[in-house]
């Protein structure tokens, strides 16, 4: 049931997010019959370095061998269209857009980001150009940061603002949807892991997996061009993205340690410590300005991928030693994540053009779904087992209580028999005394003697509730407790010595738990309103049992179920009663009206 619910949640999230993106792409803002200006993509430009012409450059292209403070100038020609717009994408550099030699727009200045970053964050902006002639020169001057040595240049897009926005959305929507799904899935798993950790320790695996998804989602969401374009919080989003990336290895490492807890290898723990030291050093080196993020990111991803492969080796070793049970499906997805993350990292070195972390993010999301389902299935089994154990303990407790009551009843019965023998033995002497009073015509003394003798005979009327000795003992015990608490009891029970196939133990579970619940409910009302009424009968091969009791009207209802006041969910006692009723092909129902709670059931005997 939980597994299906989790699949449904993921499916709904996926459909909603995809629908949102499709709706945006098909909305009138992005699809109109007429655009004021068409979209023009320029992929060949003239450029200069430190005002020295370098010729023509085909985009996209990465200029290397640059130094801090170097200026790269790119020259464009204006289309001359009115209300034209230019897409300006800048990676970790300051950029100034000039029109006919006059500065018009600037991004990445020293006052736009905190000093610890050492370099401007990536920025994506659509600049509205003034109405100029077709021969107007557009110049973009890129200034390399103090720790930079390269510059990435992408093709320039100009034209209608909606068309440019749509192009960015279409280029980045898949990464945007995946990052949103990672954030939602991560938050869900982290909360679920914390909620269920108290009941099953393996739930901590879900918590760490959720944190890993959250970190990956923050990294990719806050570095997505669509998010940067629409919110323009370049520095803040850069910081959040950086934090997500650098803390990502920590929950991944804790995930494997929690999963391989029985293995508990010193090498495994040592690897995690080394991982934390390595990525902390990378973060410090970046913040201190020793190395730029653009330089550190490929090595960061490559090191993380190697560590992921190392964790796969730990899983294989633990599986080989039979230390932990590893599902082949789990092993496959873990190897898939490690392999694709390594391929993703190597793509930076072998020249494959792909969004940073794209392969890793897709594989991690797929692995998250599979691993979450596997862990959920295990947790479901554990929770079911715990529930069964709780019911079994309740049943054993009820049986032990019944045996104790039967033992006490037998002791009372034995005492009563001994007392009866003694009284029969003394009866002869008593009769002689009475005969003496009568023969001497001392009638009043004889009557007084007889009254005293009657008072000394124990009453057994309250000890006979039904013919079944075990149930009789149980009923007498609870009646005594109820009357001591000021509860008026009206008990008329028909329970034969042998009730067909229904055992005394199962019957004790039914009557004992329902009597306890009724007594507890009565304690929440005024003393003068407390009552318990029980009727039972045997007819047509069925044993029927009905118990009415007063209550305060406060019900803990979920759907058609009445839940316990003492704990969350269905009470253990009620669950045990339901289990017995189901065992004997019976039914059970509750009714509540005008301060009276009624429970009725029948079982086939």
Image: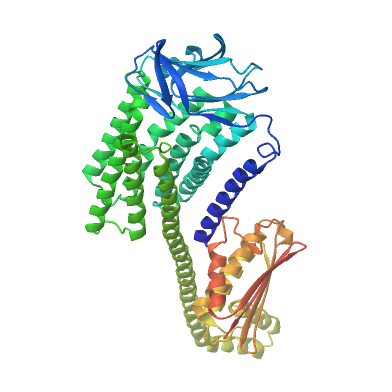
Give the colour scheme of this rendering.
Answer: rainbow
The answer to whether 127 is drawn above or below residue 28 in the figure is: above
Q: Position of residue 580 (x, y in %)?
A: 54, 75
Q: Position of residue 586 (x, y in %)?
A: 60, 79
Residue furthest right as drawn: 594
Point 46% across, 28% down: residue: 154
The answer to whether 479 is drawn above or below residue 116 in the figure is: below
Residue nearest the observer in this picture, 259 or 528 = 259
Point 60% across, 43% down: residue: 21
Residue nearest the observer in this picture, 560 or 330 = 330
The answer to whether 160 is drawn above or below residue 173 in the figure is: above
Residue nearest the observer in this picture, 318 or 228 = 228
Q: Quadrant of residue 66?
A: top left
Q: Quadrant of residue 571?
A: bottom right
Q: Quadrant of residue 577?
A: bottom right
Visible in this render: residue 213?
yes
Horizontally, residue 434 falls left or right of residue 342, namely right
The answer to whether 529 is drawn above or below residue 465 in the figure is: above
Q: Position of residue 531 (x, y in %)?
A: 70, 66
Horizontally, residue 302 falls left or right of residue 511, namely left
Residue nearest the observer in this picture, 324 or 425 = 324
Classify the position of the C terminus by image quarter. bottom right
């Amino acid at each position: 049931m939980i597994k299906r619910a989790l699949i449904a949640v993921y499916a709904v999230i996926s459909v909603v997010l995809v629908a949102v993106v499709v709706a945006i792409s098909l909305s009138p803002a992005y699809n109109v019959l007429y655009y004021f200006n068409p979209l023009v993509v320029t992929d060949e430009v003239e450029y200069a370095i430190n005002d020295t012409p370098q010729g023509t450059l085909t985009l996209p292209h990465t200029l290397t061998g640059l130094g801090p403070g170097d200026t790269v100038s790119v020259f464009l020609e204006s289309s001359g269209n009115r209300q034209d717009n230019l897409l300006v994408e800048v990676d970790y550099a300051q950029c100034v857009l000039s029109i006919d030699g006059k500065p018009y727009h600037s991004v990445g200045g020293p006052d736009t980001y905190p000093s610890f970053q050492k370099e401007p964050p990536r920025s994506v902006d659509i600049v509205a150009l003034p109405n100029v002639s077709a021969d107007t020169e557009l110049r973009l001057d890129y200034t390399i940061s103090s720790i930079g040595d390269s510059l990435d240049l992408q093709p320039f897009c100009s034209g209608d603002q909606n068309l440019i926005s749509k192009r960015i959305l279409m280029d980045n929507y898949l990464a945007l949807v995946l990052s949103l799904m990672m954030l939602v899935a991560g938050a869900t798993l982290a909360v679920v892991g914390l909620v269920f950790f108290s009941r099953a320790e393996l739930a901590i695996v879900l918590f760490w997996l959720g944190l890993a998804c959250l970190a990956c989602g923050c990294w990719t969401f806050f570095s997505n061009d669509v998010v940067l374009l629409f919110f323009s919080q370049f520095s803040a989003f850069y910081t959040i993205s950086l934090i997500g990336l650098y803390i990502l290895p920590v929950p991944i490492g804790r995930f494997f340690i929690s999963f391989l807890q029985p293995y508990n290898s010193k090498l495994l723990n040592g690897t995690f410590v080394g991982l934390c030291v390595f990525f902390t050093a990378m973060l410090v080196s970046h913040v201190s300005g020793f190395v730029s993020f653009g330089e550190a990111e490929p090595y960061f991803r490559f090191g993380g991928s190697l560590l992921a492969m190392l964790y796969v080796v730990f899983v294989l070793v633990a599986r080989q030693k039979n230390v932990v049970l590893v599902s082949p499906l789990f092993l496959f997805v873990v190897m898939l994540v490690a392999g694709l993350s390594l391929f993703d990292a190597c793509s930076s070195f072998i020249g494959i053009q792909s969004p940073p972390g794209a392969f890793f993010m897709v594989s991690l999301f797929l692995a998250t779904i599979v691993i979450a389902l596997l862990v959920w299935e295990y947790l479901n089994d554990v929770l079911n087992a715990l529930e069964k154990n709780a019911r079994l303990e309740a049943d054993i407790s009820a049986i032990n209580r019944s045996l104790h009551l039967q033992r006490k009843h037998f002791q009372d019965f034995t005492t009563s028999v001994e007392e009866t023998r003694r009284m029969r033995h003394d009866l002869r002497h008593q009769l002689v005394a009475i005969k003496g009073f009568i023969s001497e015509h001392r009638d009043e003394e004889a009557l007084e003697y007889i009254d005293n003798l009657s008072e000394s005979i124990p009453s057994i009327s309250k000890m006979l509730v039904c013919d079944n000795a075990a149930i009789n003992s149980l009923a007498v015990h609870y009646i005594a407790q109820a009357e001591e608490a000021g509860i008026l009891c009206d008990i008329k029970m028909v329970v034969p010595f042998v009730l067909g196939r229904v055992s005394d133990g199962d019957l004790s579970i039914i009557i004992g738990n329902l009597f306890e619940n009724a007594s507890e409910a009565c304690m929440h009302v005024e003393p003068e309103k407390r009552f318990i009424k029980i009727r039972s009968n045997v007819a047509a091969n069925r044993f029927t049992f009905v118990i009415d009791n007063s209550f305060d009207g406060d019900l803990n209802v979920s759907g058609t179920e009445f839940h316990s006041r003492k704990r969350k969910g269905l009470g253990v006692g009620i669950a045990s009663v339901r289990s017995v009723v189901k065992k004997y092909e019976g039914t059970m129902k509750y009714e509540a009206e005008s301060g009276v709670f009624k429970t009725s059931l029948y079982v086939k005997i």
